[in-house]
Image (cartoon, coloured by chain):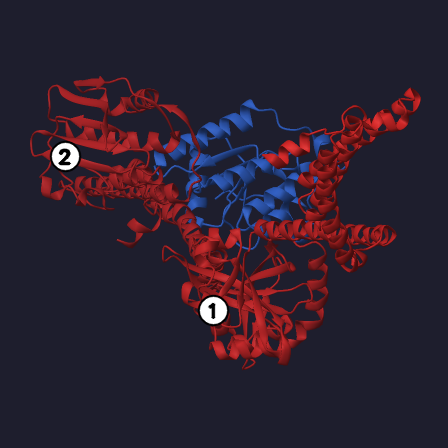
Chain colours: A blue, B red
């Protein structure tokens, strides 16, 4: 667990299942791509965090995470709803979102892409494969890919 | 002799000329006068004789003969006068005079006696007058005769006209004897006029009357007229129905002196009418024929049955009697509009129509209308069908349909539940597996040093179990997805699919000695992703069960079965006993132990579901140790295109 102050993390992990969260965090740590990871446990908390409200009132939109790892099946507000809200708001839509889910339902894929997801990854059952996947996506999104500049999170973009 | 000698004896007399002293002019005066008289007197009798001979009808002709003799005698005396001028035969002259006297005296007497009779003879003026009268009479008679002749021609012409008519016409007297018999009667009955005349008409024609003859005769003597249908038999014994009209010529005391009977052959028309009536009667619908005013003219038996009225109760009634009262006003208007331009059509298209029985019960009907042209004007025929039963069936069908719709809705709900179930399976069942696998692997990799060797082995068992379970979940999800997935049919070359599948199997076949025998396969319409999945299952099965064969031979080809193109996948693998062939395609059905050949028991169930969704089928032939052949079709059988329910069957097993 590496939950530090919200303003320095780089990855927001939205995952309600602690086992899944632990395995993901383990894989991320092993791949050594993420030094800052913030973990929220449902969709409502994720939205509060991203839209800087309630418990996260102090946060600024400019300090957006580099990447959101989003599970689809979430309590309160589900992952597709989170995706829809984030991608339809000018202040948050630039944040890359990767759906990381055990679902491979076609409808989930279609809806995610329609809502503007940046990547869709089904968690492999095999943990070795999962570790590899996590390592690859960390490498790509945090090292290879250029993160959006601060201006991308302005309300008028 | 002596007398004749004396007559001729001149004696001592002097010829008569001496008396005239031979004064020659005087002598010649006498000669010429006597000669002319003689000539005249000889001529007149000749004329009289000629006249009498010519006029043999002449009354008193003997008088003319007497006159003739008398005048000839006179002529002789005058001839004698001439002779006596030179010859003194006075005795002869005297004798001739005596003869003349003898001839003239009776003539005078007879003439006198004839006078009264002669006086009775008309005078010439009288005769002329009579003649004028006679001529007038003759003229009058001639006129009458001409008139008669004209009238006779008229009569003849009229009789001929009567012969022209197509109706059989005959006249019979009070005793029924035939007096007149026209041509049409000859033609109709086969007896010529001469044969028929004098016969009793009812006997000759073996007349069958619609009611007792005395009644008919009573009517004729009362009104002078009768008409009705009669049955006659002609000379050949053929039965003829005639429309008969009797008109009586009434003599004194009101008795019929003669009856004119006019018969029209309506045998054919009656037959047509009978056919028409039979047709009408045997019609399955109630047939009601109304006139333009909407009055019922004709109904059939079905109408009586359907509406509960007798024929007599319906004829002449307005058609509205058969319609529920609440529709009557509307109907009258509709009917009048229809009468304006009648044509065959269904009545009240799209409306529910009702009839009403005599007992007031209503029932739904279907009515079709058509105009019927007749001599009495246009009639409207309506065929009325009781559709109560059909309405009931329709209601039943509607109800069934509603039930079906409900069931479908229920199925839809169930299907949605199944869908969310499979969604849950895909998401939730997989998650714990991943966790087992993940944590076991972390344990094995990061804490291996602190585990005893058995512990590491057990961890491997845990990992394998989780892996198997993962495959099972995936296969089950595939199977469920086949039923739900929309079929996307397109032209596909099966060869291409087979090659793709073989390429996908590379990982499993890379260390194997496999001989692939692929026949050219047809192009056909199917869902390529589903068929590919089916082929993948079949081929990976073949690869799996030929594991111990060197080389393994896997053959893919095509054949004809039941008129459809079939495909087969044949291997030379371990095979199985034929009696298990039926079990092969069930979910979780396996014929080999897991240690021999791994598998979830879902693959062939998936294949069968795929081919059945295409309308085809799959079956297997096998023998232990000699390999297995799977044959499948992807289209319905030509003769019996029975579709298999794609979704429910395996689930309910």
Q: Is residue A98 left or right of residue B88?
A: left
Figure quadrant of residue B400 = bottom left
Which chain letter matches label 2? Answer: B
**Viewer-proximal residue among B59 and B519:** B59
Residue underneath mark 1:
B302
Q: Position of residue B514 (x, y in %)?
A: 18, 19
Figure quadrant of residue A82 = top right
Find residue B621 and name its label: 2
Q: Is residue B547 left or right of residue B234?
A: left
Q: Position of residue B37 (x, y in %)?
A: 82, 31
Instruction: Report the Cα–Cα distance between label 1 and label 2.
Output: 65 Å
Question: The N terminus of chain B lies in which quarter of the figure?
Answer: top right
**Viewer-proximal residue among B527 and B350:** B350
Find residue B458 and name its label: none
Which chain letter matches label 1? Answer: B
Regarding mark 1 in the picture, which secondary structure is present there?
A: helix
Regarding mark 2 in the picture, which secondary structure is present there?
A: strand
């Amino acid at each position: 667990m590496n939950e530090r102050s919200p303003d320095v993390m780089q990855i927001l992990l939205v995952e309600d299942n602690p086992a899944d969260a632990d395995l993901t965090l383990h894989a991320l740590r092993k791949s050594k791509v993420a030094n800052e990871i913030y973990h929220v446990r449902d969709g409502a908390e994720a939205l509060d965090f991203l839209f800087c409200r309630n418990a996260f009132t102090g946060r600024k939109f400019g300090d957006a995470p580099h990447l959101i790892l989003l599970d689809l099946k979430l309590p309160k507000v589900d992952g597709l709803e989170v995706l829809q809200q984030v991608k339809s708001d000018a202040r948050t839509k630039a944040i890359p979102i990767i759906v990381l889910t055990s679902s491979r339902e076609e409808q989930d894929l279609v809806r995610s892409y329609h809502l503007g997801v940046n990547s869709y990854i089904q968690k492999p059952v095999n943990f070795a494969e999962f570790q590899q996947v996590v390592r690859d996506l960390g490498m790509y999104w945090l090292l290879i890919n250029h993160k959006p500049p601060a201006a991308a999170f302005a309300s008028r973009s | 002799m002596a007398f004749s000698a004396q007559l001729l004896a001149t004696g001592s007399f002097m010829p008569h000329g001496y008396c005239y002293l031979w004064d020659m002019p005087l002598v010649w005066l006498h000669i010429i006068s006597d000669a002319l008289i003689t000539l005249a007197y000889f001529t007149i009798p000749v004329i009289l004789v000629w006249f009498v001979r010519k006029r043999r009808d002449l009354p008193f002709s003997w008088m003319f003969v007497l006159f003739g003799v008398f005048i000839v005698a006179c002529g002789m005396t005058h001839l004698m006068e001439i002779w006596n001028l030179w010859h003194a035969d006075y005795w002869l002259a005297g004798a001739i005079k005596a003869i003349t006297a003898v001839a003239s005296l009776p003539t005078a007497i007879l003439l006198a006696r004839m006078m009264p009779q002669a006086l009775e003879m008309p005078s010439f003026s009288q005769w002329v007058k009579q003649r004028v009268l006679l001529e007038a009479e003759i003229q009058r008679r001639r006129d009458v005769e001409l008139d008669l002749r004209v009238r006779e021609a008229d009569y003849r012409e009229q009789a001929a006209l009567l012969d022209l008519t197509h109706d059989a016409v005959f006249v019979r007297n009070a005793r029924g004897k035939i007096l007149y018999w026209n041509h049409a009667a000859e033609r109709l009955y086969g007896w010529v006029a001469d044969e028929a005349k004098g016969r009793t008409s009812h006997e000759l024609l073996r007349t069958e009357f619609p009611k007792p003859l005395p009644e008919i005769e009573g009517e004729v003597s009362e009104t002078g007229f009768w008409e009705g249908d009669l049955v006659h038999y002609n000379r050949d014994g053929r039965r003829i129905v005639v429309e008969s009209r009797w008109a009586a010529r009434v003599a004194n005391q009101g008795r019929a002196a003669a009856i004119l009977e006019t018969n029209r052959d309506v045998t054919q028309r009656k037959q047509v009418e009978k056919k028409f009536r039979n047709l009408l009667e045997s019609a399955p619908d109630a047939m009601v024929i109304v006139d333009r005013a909407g009055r019922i003219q004709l109904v059939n038996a079905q109408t009586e049955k359907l509406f509960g009225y007798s024929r007599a109760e319906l004829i002449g009634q307005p058609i509205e009697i058969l319609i529920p009262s609440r529709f009557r006003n509307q109907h009258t208007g509709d009917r009048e509009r229809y009468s304006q331009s009648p044509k065959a059509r269904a009545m009240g298209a799209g409306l529910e129509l009702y009839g009403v029985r005599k007992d007031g019960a209503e029932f739904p009907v279907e009515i079709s209308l058509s105009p019927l042209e007749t001599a009495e004007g246009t009639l409207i025929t309506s065929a009325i069908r009781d559709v109560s039963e059909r309405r009931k069936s329709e209601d039943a069908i509607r109800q069934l349909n509603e039930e079906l719709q409900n069931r479908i809705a229920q199925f839809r709900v169930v299907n949605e539940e199944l869908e969310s179930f499979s969604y849950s399976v895909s998401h939730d069942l997989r998650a714990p597996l991943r966790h087992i696998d993940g944590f076991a692997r972390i344990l094995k990799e990061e804490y291996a040093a602190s585990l005893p060797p058995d512990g590491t082995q057990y961890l491997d068992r845990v990992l394998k179990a989780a892996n198997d379970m993962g495959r099972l979940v995936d296969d089950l999800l595939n199977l469920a997805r086949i039923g739900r997935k929309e079929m996307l049919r397109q032209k596909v070359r099966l060869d291409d699919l087979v090659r793709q599948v073989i390429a996908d199997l590379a990982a499993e076949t890379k260390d194997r000695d496999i001989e692939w025998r692929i026949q050219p396969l047809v192009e056909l319409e199917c869902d390529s992703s589903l068929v590919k999945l089916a082929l993948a299952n079949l081929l990976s099965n073949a690869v799996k069960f030929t594991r111990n064969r060197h080389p393994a031979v896997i053959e893919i080809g095509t054949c004809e079965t039941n008129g459809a193109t079939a495909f087969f996948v044949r291997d030379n693998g371990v095979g199985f006993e034929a009696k298990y062939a039926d079990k092969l395609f069930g979910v979780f059905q396996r014929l080999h132990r897991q240690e021999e050949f791994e598998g979830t028991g879902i693959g062939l169930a998936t294949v069968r579901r795929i081919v059945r969704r295409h309308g085809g089928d799959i079956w297997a032939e096998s023998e232990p140790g000699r390999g297995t052949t799977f044959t499948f079709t992807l289209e319905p059988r030509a003769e019996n295109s029975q579709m298999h329910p794609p979704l429910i069957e395996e689930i309910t097993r």
